[in-house]
Image (cartoon, rainbow, N blue to C red):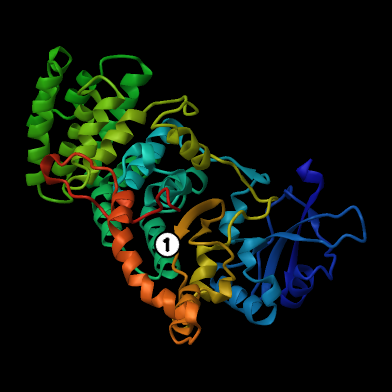
Amino acid sequence: MFESELAFAIVDEAELNDLASGKARPSGQRWPLTYSRPRLSNGSFGVLYEEAQDPQRPVRPLAIIADPSAHRRLYVRFSQVRSDLSPLSAWCHVLSPASFEMLDTPIRRADLGPFEAAWAGLAIAEAAILSGRPLSQVKVAACLATRSFAIGRTLALWPNRSLPDVLSDYEELQRNVRLGGSSGMERVRASFEPIWQTLAACASPDAYYPTRSDAISAVLALVRAREHNTDETSYLREVLSDFAEARVLSGLAELGPEGRLRIFDKLVQATLSAKPDSDYRTVLSFLSGYIATVAAGGSASLGLAEDVSQSLPEVAGWAYVIGGLGERVTWTGGFNGLGRLVSRELTRPFNVAEPPAVDFSAEEASALVDKQLSDPLVHLQVKQSRVVAAALYPGVNLQVPFAEPASDNRNSRARDAVKGSNDPMSVLADALLPLLVSRLQPTLDATNRPPRRGTRYGRKAAQSDLLTDKD
């Protein structure tokens, strides 16, 4: 059992160095402790480790517990003094005392309640919108790179984290690793933020988002209706009675697909005209998303939301959320097979006794990235190609695309060397290259051109802001 194998000790800086190097065997107490944990004094660290039965076997720290104000110095010191043990967060969890106190056992369960499928759908919607690809071509790695996944996973494991803090930490990670922003991601953030606020408030009764109160009521009404297997539209009409647009729900069941399509078009136009970041616009986009899910009586009608996803990302977001509200069985092949994979990662338990499955943490990246260098990530010792796994918080692991400036520089130098060479084959290659490019370019363009999608409401093709199937 874990209780008989794990131990906790408080050490100073020198003892931590020896312990991390496998040179020390601390005298700790069996963990979880049966009484309140001791307070850490200045310059001291808590260490969770596995007791080795074999005296010849080195003791390996599983987690280092330190005040958040000491984390940056900890990362920098290991990077400068013991670079063989850096990045620290690639092999050992680094926790604050508050986070460690939330661990009553080595395994912390992730729980999103009846909103698990909704969060999975929202992450998939965000990935599809940012990549500009149809659902059938969206890869799971793209979903695990989204803000929606980061927020949902954080709420599942660490519900005490506030939404603004999660978004701020996510954006700092993107700036540090991707070395640049993305207008597409910012546009989607503005559209999705009311949905994140609504789902976060629904999951946390103590949270209060006054500008989203009507949307919160609508979401909870849908969940109740589906739990009791009763008429959804009557629940929605009741909680949205202050909105004239909610009257379209009356007699919805008797309308055919064409009638529902007309309602959808009117709601979309009203949403486009509504003031951004208002409760009114949020309710209109919610209603539009709801109509999209029932317009053709099933998942096929999500195409309506996809058609307007570039002009109104929030409508597509709500459509994917509403389809999963109250859904308890999340291991089916929903969303073209993506649903079960994203849901699995959202609810994967966090085991502090297992090494981190990441290249580094967002916190360590913030401490070690040096944008003055030609390779800003050099201190993080990245060994992946194009994509890294980074922990936003312990157990909240994201996929992050990144630039490889050092590799690009090497390739540039190699090309320059070839161009300056007097080798006959190099000269011949330089002479033929423009001709080959001109001959092959039409074929390459046709091969790489993304599939055409609907242009209803003036939708334009989007550049990929996240991972695509080429990654």
Residue farthest along the top direction in this orientation: 254
Quadrant in which the N terminus is drawn: top right
Q: Is residue 371 above or below residue 442?
A: below
Q: Residue at x 47, y 39 (%)?
A: 342
Q: Is residue 181 visible?
A: no
Residue 427 on image: x %, y %: 43, 80
Q: Is residue 420 above or below residue 102?
A: below
Q: Which residue is mark 1?
A: 169
- Residue at (41% x, 59% y) in the render: 170
In the depicted view, which residue is nearer to us: 269 or 414?
Answer: 414
Residue 317, picture quadrant? top left
Residue 77: % across, % down: 63, 79
Left or right of residue 403: residue 186: left
Q: Secondary structure at mark 1?
A: helix
- At x 21%, y 25%, the residue is 236
- Image position, residue 418 (x, y; %): 47, 81
Around disc 1, counting alpha carbons within 10 Å, would you say few (fewer than 14), some (14 to 19), or many (20 or more)? some
Labels in figure, total: 1
Horizontal arrangement in the rendering, residue 322 relative to residue 394 (left or right): left
Rendering quarter of residue 49: bottom right
Residue 225 appearing in the image: yes
Vertical comparison of 437 with 373: above or below: above
Q: Where is residue 29? Give x, y as percent.
A: 80, 55
Q: Amino acid at mark 1?
A: Asp
Is residue 453 or residue 446 the one in the foreground?
446
Q: Residue shown at 29%/22% (left/top)? A: 298
Instruction: Say which of 105 and 232 sits in front.
Output: 232
